[in-house]
Amino acid sequence: MNLLTLILYSIPSSWFIRRDTRQRSGITPWLWIPTIWIGIISTKPLTSWLAIGGDGSTSMEGSSVDAVFYFSLIALAFVALVKRGLDWGDVFRRNWPIFLLYGFFLISVLWANSSFVSFKRWFKEFGNILIVLVILTEPDPRQALRAIFTRCAFQFFALSVIFIRYIPELGRRYSRSGGLEITGVTTQKNTLGAMVAICSVFLLWDWIEKARNKQLKTWKDKLIIPALLALGIHLLYLCNSQTSMLCMTVGLLIVLASKVGYLRKRIGAFGLYTLIAAAVYYVLDAEFGLSQQLIGAMGRDMTFTGRTDVWRELRNLDTNPIFGTGFMSLWDDPFYRDQLPYWVSSSAHNGYLEIYLMGGWVAIGLLGFVLLWAAFRINASLRQGDNFSLIRFGLLAMALIMNFSESNFACMTPMGLLLWLAAIGHARAAHVDPIPVRPRPAPVRASGPRPVQPPGVRPRRYRTT
């Protein structure tokens, strides 16, 4: 029954991918590299999809199958960028704060518990930058972005429902506390929530762009995206990931702002509006405890579902406050693991704390500088009235919010990748396949001589078709 369900699902899935590819212009076959990469980091490792293990190596070393898979995609991404003649110097000059942060993380592998393992994780995480550059050097990067996440939504939303309903050993799990979690195609409920929130934002953006370009001609075009959005909301309700719900709401509202005439004409003032809103929220929170009321309305308490206990235990660790423990090294270090309770999993559940643990105050300072640099850069694009900068602004806002309860900075997550995409925004390539343009049919003229008009009669103008 399970195999039959998956076979039946593969039929509409293949139809949608073929149809979506045929309808979009400005994308190349190289786009499958970031599509597969994002699909994997948004759900679960390749070995979990294939239901195979590694070669008997330890959990710290990881699976050799996954290692070969990621290395192959990174190598293909590098080949694509070389073939396109990417201006590497321009990329480094325009985005040096990001490379400065990754440069420090590379140095930090020297004092990690296992320098070789830490370096492998750094190399895989740095692959996100190459994947972002492949997207940004497509003939139409905006079309490429929408294509990636629309396909992911169609694949993973429906498949998550199938796993949850018909294959519970794949779509559900019991947490350490004994509660039932809805995981769908991912490994935990928060990962499922993040995947749904991100894909939903791009679905709405794609639907708005298609409506603006008058591409919603058939009932299939008009109903597919609203149906996927409804399915995503249903999945968020099932997994009950409140942070993802908040991030999706913020992202959808920012995308919808491009359709509001008053806000669209003042797109350049979005940065100022954000600062005013943050100041007003700070005052209201200080006077009326707005945060506590908001969190209570979301069905949570001020412990953030036990996260404050995890943060307390991690802050009490005697890590190096200046340089940290090394890139992604703390969770495999027996010295630190022995000091933590069993209920602290391999995540700080806070992106800012995670960066502090791996790189100390130096990494926190570099991350803060990168975020401020990205914010000013996106704000400068907003002043130019670019609609794509509004999407970048939404991704930045979602990343800042999501990292308060989940670790996304430099942790191989789709939100972490999209943060760098929002910050970079543009890449210059010398050789990119031109956007295919459908030739217009030549006008058909009537054969034979034109009829002679009688004297004094105004000649009739013939309209060609």
Image (tube, rainbow, N blue to C red):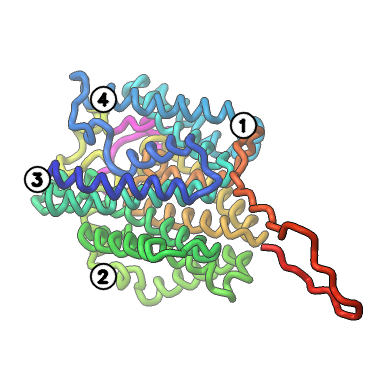
Q: Is residue 30 above or below residue 6?
A: above
Number of the front mark, 2 or 4: 4
Q: What's the amino acid at mark 4?
A: Ser
Residue, x 50% and y 70% (percent of image)? 277
Mark 1 or mark 4: whose residue is earlier in sequence: 4
Structural distance between the alpha carbons of marks 1 and 4: 32 Å
Residue highlighted by disc 2: 296
Magenta residues (range): 312-330
Q: Is 123 displayed left or right of 309 in the figure?
A: right
Number of the front mark, 3 or 1: 3
**Mark 2 secondary-structure assignment:** helix
Q: What's the amino acid at mark 3?
A: Met
Mark 3 or mark 4: whose residue is earlier in sequence: 3
Q: What's the amino acid at mark 2?
A: Gly
Q: Residues within 10 Å of mark 3 (few under 14, many from 20)?
A: few
Mark 3 or mark 1: whose residue is earlier in sequence: 3
Q: Nearer the viewer, residue 109 or 250?
A: 250
Number of the front mark, 1 or 2: 1
Residue 124 x, y percent position in the rendering? 40, 30
Residue, x 61% and y 36% (percent of image)? 432
Residue highlighted by disc 1: 86
Q: Nearer the viewer, residue 114 or 311?
A: 114
Q: Residues within 10 Å of mark 1 (few under 14, many from 20)?
A: many
Residue highlighted by disc 4: 63
Residue 168 x, y percent position in the rendering? 11, 48
Mark 2 or mark 4: whose residue is earlier in sequence: 4
Is 318 part of what is drawn in magenta? yes
Residue highlighted by disc 3: 1
